[in-house]
Image (cartoon, helix red, strand yellow):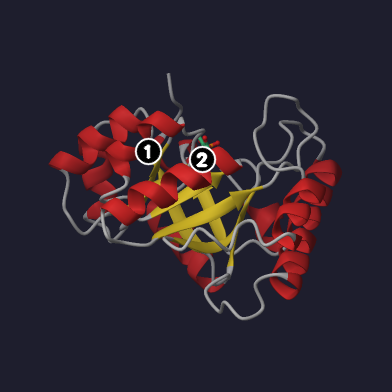
Amino acid sequence: MKSYESLANYCKEHNTTLVAVSKTKPNSAIEELYNQGQRIFGENRVQELVDKEATLPKDIAWHMIGHLQTNKVKYISAFVDMIQSGDRTSLLKEINKEALKSQRKIDVLLQIKIAQEESKHGWDIAQLKELLSNGLLEKYENINFRGVMGMATFTDNETQVSQEFKNLKSYFDQLQSQYFSNISTFDTISMGMSGDYELAISAGSNMVRVGSLLFGKRS
Ligand SMILES: *Cc1c(COP(=O)(O)O)cnc(C)c1O
């Protein structure tokens, strides 16, 4: 484990936003970091997110980082600060609909598949570009597209992980210049977790999602 202070300072020095991934951890663990100044927390299950939001301080910015079923968007749309797992059209459509109902715009990252594993969700970059070329994402007026998110392959091979992060950085640059050049808030590259956040930051990440390194192993 690493102290909150040293990780927070490392991120600050590298102009990187730290998302503390608190999934499966009790409120007391979140409050401990909150009292040290952390305000952004990431969760991957809707029910858990809803329960924590209801009881913890209101100035916490909650990020949904896990695979999101369309029928559950409505439970988080009124308060969620960012949905990092925007990985398919049906989900974007639903987020847009629920954001409109809540009379707000929701920040969303486009989750892109960079890993080799079949299990990882995310857009195929070519398919995403095709949708963007056809103007298909412009109709989501209540979504504020903020950037990209990705997860590297679960492997000890640092060369591979680093290459996957560089690929995501490159995809971000391409999307930004080709499709989002007049949207100044398309500025976020969310990549890097407990085991690979330094590699990710070297490759251009400006948002890391760190859980076990801060909170200890999950059971
Ligand atoms: C759990 C999770 C993390 C954090 O993982 P750690 O290895 O515990 O830091 C980051 N991103 C996503 C999408 C996760 O589900």
Q: Which of 190 and 21 is in front in this view?
A: 190
Q: Name the residue rendered at 50%, 58% in the picture.
A: 140
The residue closer to the viewer here, 19 or 76, is 76
Judge the density around disc 2: few (<14), some (14-19), many (≥20) Cα neighbours within 10 Å.
some
Residue at the disc numbered 1: 73
Q: For marks 2 and 1, give the CA distance.
A: 8 Å
Give the residue type at disc 2: Leu
- Describe residue 119's horizontal placement relative to residue 8 as left or right: right
Residue 184 vertical position relative to residue 122 in the rendered view, above or below? below
Q: Residue at x 85, y 45 (%)?
A: 159
Give left or right: position of 204 versus 101. right
- How crowded pointer 1 is (Cα within 10 Å; few <14, some 14-19, many 20+) is rated as many
Which residue has dot 2 on it?
Answer: 91
Quadrant in which the C terminus appears: top left
Residue 87 appears in the rendering: no
Residue visible at 29% across and 30% down?
Answer: 48
Which residue of the protein is positioned furthest toward the top in this rendering?
219
Q: Residue at x 38, y 33 (%)?
A: 23
Q: Quadrant of residue 37?
A: bottom left
Q: Which label belongs to residue 98?
A: none
Q: Identify the element where label 1 is drawn.
A: helix
Please state the horizontal and vertical placement of residue 163, each as a whole percent of the image.
Answer: 84, 50
Q: Is mark 2 on a helix, strand or loop?
A: helix
Work out whether mark 2 precedes mark 1 in sequence or the reverse, and give the earlier one. 1
User: Where does residue 128 sit, x and y in percent of width and height?
Assistant: 73, 51
